[in-house]
Image: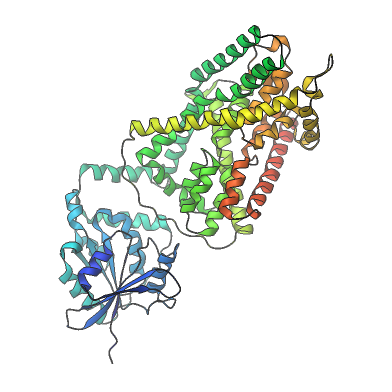
Amino acid sequence: MTRTPLIAVVGNPNAGKSALFNALTGARQKVGNYPGVTVERHAGRFMLANGHTAELVDLPGAYALDAGSPDEEVTRNVVLGEGDYERLPDALLVVLDAANLDNHLRFALQLIQLGLPTVVALNMVDLAERDGLELDAAVLEAELGVPVIETVAVRRRGIDAVRDKLTEAATGPRDVREGAGVEEDPLTLQRRAREIAMKAIVSETPTRQFTHRLDGLLLHPVAGPIILAVLLFVMFQAVFAWAAPPADFLEGVVIGAGEWIGTNMTDSWLKSLIVDGLFAGVGAVVVFLPQILILFLFILVLEGTGYMVRAAFLMDKLMGRAGLNGSAFIPLLSSFACAVPGIMATRTIEDPKDRLTTILIAPLMTCSARLPVYALIIAAFIPNREVAPFIGLQGLVLFGLYVAGIVGALILGSLIRRKVVKGEGGTFMMELPKYQMPRISDVLIGLWQRAWIFLKRAGTIILATTMLLWVLASYPKAGPGESQVEASIAGKIASGIEVVVEPIGFNRDISLALLPAMAAREVAVAAIGTVYALDAEDEDGLQTLEERVAGRWSLATALAFLAWFVFAPQCISTIAVTRRETNGWKWPLFMTGYLFAVAYVAAGITYWTAVAFGLG
């Protein structure tokens, strides 16, 4: 008895597989579930050109053979003849979206490399032609080594030709091609797919040509990473260079308003609360609003142009060294704004081990809350001068701190992936969006949202924490000739913490700032501002916070403080969202513990090295 040939319809999501499946089988379909999973099985029968019947199964859409979801696992097992879902197909019908050829060819190349008899349906050619893209199916056939048929499944165009080729493939002599195995590296597949697609293009619109040329430059293995690094470098230079005038203006307003209130109010606890708590504490954080807006201006513009997804592709190989892939790039990039949305964005990562590792290193990305801390210390200790034309030393140091966080995340991510979260990871597939000019309204709305979030934090968490710190630092009152901070409750607490952090160069003032910084990192700046305002002599009244810090800290201590905040334990909100996303306390406690240890060691090494070079 002759067995009914089994033909699998396979391809990327939205390639038109189901339309082609319906055109071939008509009403002779059955819908059920694959055993053990909730994935639907669509199967049907159709008449081959030789009059025999074949069974057609429409597999779930997938991007690669490396399965990341139950749907993709079914597809993978069927085409490899593994699992109990189906027997090994006698032939494959690979469906490609003609308008998205280079992206869909990646998976097609893997399928063809399996060696099964294969027919390729170049589907939706009418839509591609409408968009100005004309393809040569003969060239594509020559490059792929399998029959390629142009189809428009919804109009039944090319269906008879597909039927003829499937008859030859499923009932003819089995011609199993030999090769070097299935290529799994996404970048290698992407390059080969792009090469084939470019050869198959007869003509295309100038817009599509521009996109390909620009991708050829921005995704080049050498030029691409260099361009990305230059863009990031310019961004951090601008954070200091462009923000200086508005930041200085804001700082002048805050200092002037505090001085005016201090002059016109009689001495009382209310005056101290407003001047030393509100203006010296919260005001010291608010003045960094321009830096944060400039940082997000760059991020929003790069997102709006479609470049960020391409940056994820560029980062895929680098992320691979940390045991991750490019899918971790977007969540980690989001963590530059705040670790909380970054950790929530890991839900898009399909592999659970990749996702957990990304969650554990997300707090190492330099969030915007760290920016006020960095800006304060850099402005206090790093000279504002150029080291080369258009390259300021302060911006260079800021860039170095961001790079230190990224490098630290990659190293620690690699260790966590190999020693703690062991196992193979998934691959990364993502379709590239079109280049476009970002909409000004979208950018302005994004900037407004970031400004509102920052000011809201200043008016809630930072204000409340600063007020509490003011109370603890103001009572009990100091005696004549005694330091108010040393005599206060906060001073006593700081003295206890100082015992632990003194070996790494931290003084009492830094010790006092570390604890409230767990509420929000920028509270460290507010805490230092409040403490120095309470301890200030009359002649210090017009000094900026940068001048006060520069007068009381050594350079070695300042560098150690920066190193601490590169790896600093995350805020309470980050711990809470990690607990929610990992469904327990095990991983939040692990994350907090290892970050504390790394921050302490990094600050210690920085301080001891600086002292050894005479900077203490």
In this rendering, the answer to whether 310 lies above or below 515 is below
Could you tell me which residue is drawn at 42 percent across and 34 percent down? 446
In this rendering, the answer to whether 146 lies above or below 135 is below
Could you tell me which residue is drawn at 57 percent across and 51 percent down? 580
Q: Position of residue 118 (x, y in %)?
A: 28, 71
Q: Position of residue 112 (x, y in %)?
A: 33, 68
Q: Position of residue 598 (x, y in %)?
A: 68, 44
Q: Is residue 112 left or right of residue 337?
A: left
Q: Quadrant of residue 566?
A: top right
Residue farthest along the top direction in this orientation: 264
The number of callouts visible is 0
Looking at the rendered image, the quarter that the C terminus falls into is: top right
Q: Nearer the viewer, residue 7 or 204?
A: 7
In this rendering, the answer to whether 300 lies above or below 17 is above
Looking at the rendered image, the quarter that the N terminus falls into is: bottom left
Q: How is the image coloured?
A: rainbow
Q: Position of residue 142 (x, y in %)?
A: 24, 64
Q: Quadrant of residue 568?
A: top right
Q: Nearer the viewer, residue 591 or 141?
A: 591
Q: Quadrant of residue 595?
A: top right
Could you tell me which residue is drawn at 35 percent across and 38 percent down? 305
Q: Is residue 392 left or right of residue 547?
A: left
Could you tell me which residue is drawn at 54 percent across and 43 percent down? 340
Q: Is residue 147 visible?
A: no
In this rendering, the answer to whether 119 lies above or below 557 is below
Q: Nearer the viewer, residue 515 or 434?
A: 515
Q: Is residue 130 visible?
A: yes
Q: Is residue 98 left or right of residue 607?
A: left
